[in-house]
Image (spheres, helix red, strand yellow):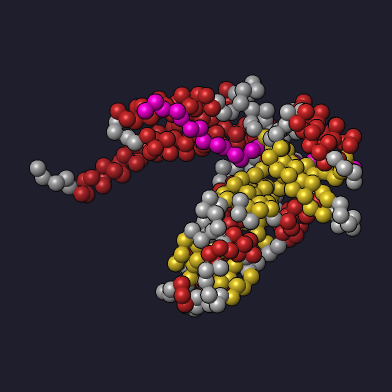
Amino acid sequence: MSSPDLNQVRIDISSTDSQLLELLSKRRKLSINVAQSKLATTKPVRDTEREQQLLVKLIEQGKALNLDALYVTQVFHSIIEDSVLLQQAYLQNHINPETVAHKVRVAFLGQQGSYSHLAAQKYFARRAEEVIEHGCASFKEIINTVESGRADYALLPIENTSSGGINEVYDILQHTSLHIVGELSVPVEHCLLVATDTEEHKIKTIYSHFQPVAQCSEYLSTLNDIKIEQADSSANALEIVSQLQRDDVAAIGNSEGGRLYGLTPIQTGIANQKQNYSRFIVVARKPIDVAAQIPAKTTFIMSVKQRPGSLVDALLILKQNKINMCKLESRPIPGNPWEEMFYVDVESNVDSDNMRNALKNLGEITTFIKILGCYPSDDIKPTNPTVDS
């Protein structure tokens, strides 16, 4: 039996890939048709029961085609997630037509290659054909850029699964007039990147933003005689190392950003937690409405009376109204020693009856309360099919 011609096999693969792309495009258009059918109803975008049935059926079909169940599940998890996000974006554009734009101006921390820059690209890829980027040196500059009208949106990192909340951002949210209009979580894959052909034991200085240093503390503790130099952002660290072109310096960043600066990773996966994610919030000058068909989050800040049980009383109001709290963070109130401002994320639309009632009751027992924003939830949990073995 003669061996297949490699060139012909590659031609056939390319042809099959093109057919796959056409089918994916067709499926996306059908997803938009689904969203259009839900405009006149409050039927949720996601139907997890149908997703479960769909995945089970696809796995069985895949078995008949000699396709592994895990492979089929991974492929369709990505397809379903894309479909959900696409439908959400369509419904949001319909309810907020003033936000639809061909071109958007976005402010973020650092420059090209920073995690904030990569997150901005990911978030606005579905929302605008052209993104005008405004790299900023500080969180305060980011806020000022949007408040002054020089940018339409800002992207702010708010927390990380390894290093926790970013206090400076929480403090800025107390005083800004901007509103949270979106969120996204992105995987953070820290690497040790260099500009020359060198080795780890030769490195004497590492440039990094302070957040990656905290997130990679366990790895850094294994290195001897290392000096940490703080950079304004991860991208700034990459740029410095690229300019130095020395075999004794390195930067902590992501490999995708490193490629923009001609850097190569010599160690990967150096974060304390292998499942390391950063959550970003998107802020704008005007609030948005969230379609009833979309899972929503509401973020607000409040201060409570200085008496025993006052915080518990406030949280009980959420429980009584069947509202799930997914985040509680406290920060000191400047000028008020030992008093705290509480940041609360809940899984609820601010316009729902339950949320309206909860806010009314909270207003009666808190000393201060302010809605920071209501926005679509980015948490698209994959459906795990139950297949009989």
Determine whether 158 is above or below 29 in the image.
below
Q: How many marks?
A: 0
Looking at the image, which residue is at 78% across and 42% down? 300
Question: 338 or 200: which is nearer to us?
Answer: 338
Q: Position of residue 227 (x, y in %)?
A: 59, 75
Determine whether 146 is above or below 63 in the image.
below
Looking at the image, which residue is at 32% across and 30% down? 63
**Quadrant housing residue 337:** bottom right
Q: Position of residue 40 (x, y in %)?
A: 64, 21
Determine whether 342 is above or below 359 in the image.
below
Q: Quadrant of the C terminus?
A: top left
Residue 323 lies in the magenta stretch: no
Q: Is residue 110 left or right of residue 383?
A: right
Q: Which residues are magenta?
A: 367-389
Looking at the image, which residue is at 82% across and 41% down? 311
Can see residue 144?
A: yes
Can see residue 288?
A: no
Looking at this view, name the residue that lies furthest to the top.
41
Q: Position of residue 134 (x, y in %)?
A: 65, 58
**Quadrant housing residue 36:** top right
Question: 332 or 280: which is nearer to us?
Answer: 332
Looking at the image, which residue is at 53% across and 64% down? 219
Residue 383 lies in the magenta stretch: yes
Q: Position of residue 206 (x, y in %)?
A: 56, 72
Q: Is residue 340 left or right of residue 31?
A: right
